């Protein structure tokens, strides 16, 4: 199985980018008669992923056009443990509830595409890597979702940020202005995606500062989204999975109103990713909740 995962990432990339724990019966003897059990240390080849997710309609919208998908599994065999995770955040747009149709179609289409072409092949009795690379599979899933939205919900659109974890590698496919972040144990927050927004493009050209962009009247205008315009290439990047820390996906309803320092603080004070996600949602609503809010948080243990 290890070789299969390695082969997936060693392909040429497209140009666009154990033992049992002893037990004893429960008794009510004197303390000196009880057996003292020292569980053996468990050595894992790959970390167990701990995941939380949450979303909210916000305080100023009457329906939720965000959609999210979180799937985590671990395969233990041949004295090794393999991690597989697929996480997606999509922020729909279009009005008259077309946005929620687009975001729902996007996550279902890409999740189904990746599951059929990658995950199921790895679960076969004699697993073998697919003919396509991970990057090519993700690109195909995004393009398929784009076509489905164009057909089933014309006039709508959605952002899409998808994270695929395979053992110690993570690959992100991204369109729009939802975001992926990495939070290090030292408290550094790094954006892993690039917003496909008008203000971001103006910032890159030196026409706006970050402060001006945050209050620009067209800050929510996108120049790239699923379901809108001609076919395009999504941003696809592969990174090593951090040895510890957190990975977060979220819609702009979170990152647009909660500061990075507050995001870091809330994650660090939370006992687990699910509680952290709820704290983040609450913080966005406390800041006015102007938009739908979605967050997925993955903790990579030490």
Image (cartoon, rainbow, N blue to C red):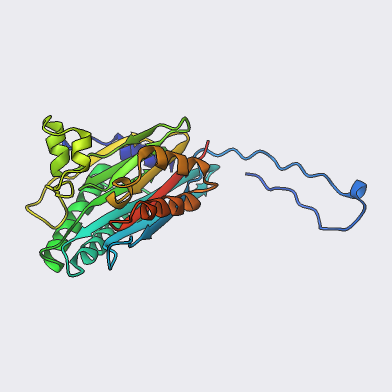
Residue at x 48%, y 46% (from the top left corner): 49
Most foreground residue, 99 or 232: 99
Most foreground residue, 229 or 116: 229
- Compared to residue 191, the image places residue 120 above or below, namely below
Residue at x 52%, y 42% (from the top left corner): 269
From this viewpoint, is residue 33 visible?
A: yes
Most foreground residue, 92 or 160: 92
Residue at x 88%, y 58% (from the top left corner): 28
From this viewpoint, is residue 122 visible?
A: no
- Compared to residue 140, the image places residue 242 above or below, namely above
- Across and down, in percent, residue 30 comes to 93, 52
- Across and down, in percent, residue 24 comes to 80, 53
Residue located farthest toward the left when viewing the structure as drawn: 230
Q: Specify the quadrant of the image occupied by residue 99.
A: bottom left
Most foreground residue, 154 or 287: 287
The answer to whether 34 appears left or right of 89 in the picture is right
The answer to whether 158 appears left or right of 38 in the picture is left
- Across and down, in percent, residue 132 comes to 24, 45
- Across and down, in percent, residue 212 comes to 18, 37
Q: Specify the quadrant of the image occupied by residue 124.
A: bottom left
């Amino acid at each position: 199985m290890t070789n299969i995962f390695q082969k997936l990432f060693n392909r040429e990339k497209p140009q666009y980018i154990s033992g049992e724990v002893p037990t004893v019966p429960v008794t009510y003897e004197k303390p000196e008669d009880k057996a003292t059990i020292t569980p053996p240390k468990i050595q894992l080849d790959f970390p167990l992923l701990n995941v939380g997710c949450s979303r909210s309609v916000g305080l100023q919208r009457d329906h939720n056009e965000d959609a999210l998908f979180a799937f985590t599994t671990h395969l233990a065999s041949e004295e090794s443990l393999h991690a597989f995770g697929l996480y997606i955040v999509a922020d729909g747009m279009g009005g008259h509830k077309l946005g929620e149709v687009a975001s729902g179609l996007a996550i279902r289409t890409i999740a189904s595409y990746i599951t059929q072409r990658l995950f199921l092949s790895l679960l076969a009795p004699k697993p073998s890597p697919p003919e396509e690379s991970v990057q090519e599979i993700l690109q195909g899933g995004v393009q398929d979702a784009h076509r489905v939205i164009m057909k089933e919900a014309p006039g709508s659109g959605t952002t899409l940020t998808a994270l695929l974890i395979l053992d110690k590698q993570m690959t992100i496919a991204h369109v729009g202005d939802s975001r992926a972040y990495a939070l290090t144990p030292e408290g550094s927050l790094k954006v892993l995606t690039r917003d496909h927004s008008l203000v971001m493009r103006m910032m890159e050209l030196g026409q706006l500062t970050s402060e001006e962009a945050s209050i620009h009247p067209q800050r929510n205008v996108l120049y790239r989204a699923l379901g809108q315009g001609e076919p395009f290439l999504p941003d696809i990047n592969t990174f090593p999975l951090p040895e510890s820390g957190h990975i977060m996906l979220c819609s702009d309803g979170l990152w647009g109103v909660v500061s990075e320092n507050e995001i870091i603080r809330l994650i660090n004070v939370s006992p687990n990713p699910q509680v952290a996600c709820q704290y983040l949602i609450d913080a966005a609503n406390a800041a006015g909740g102007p938009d739908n809010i979605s967050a997925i948080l993955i903790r990579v243990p030490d």
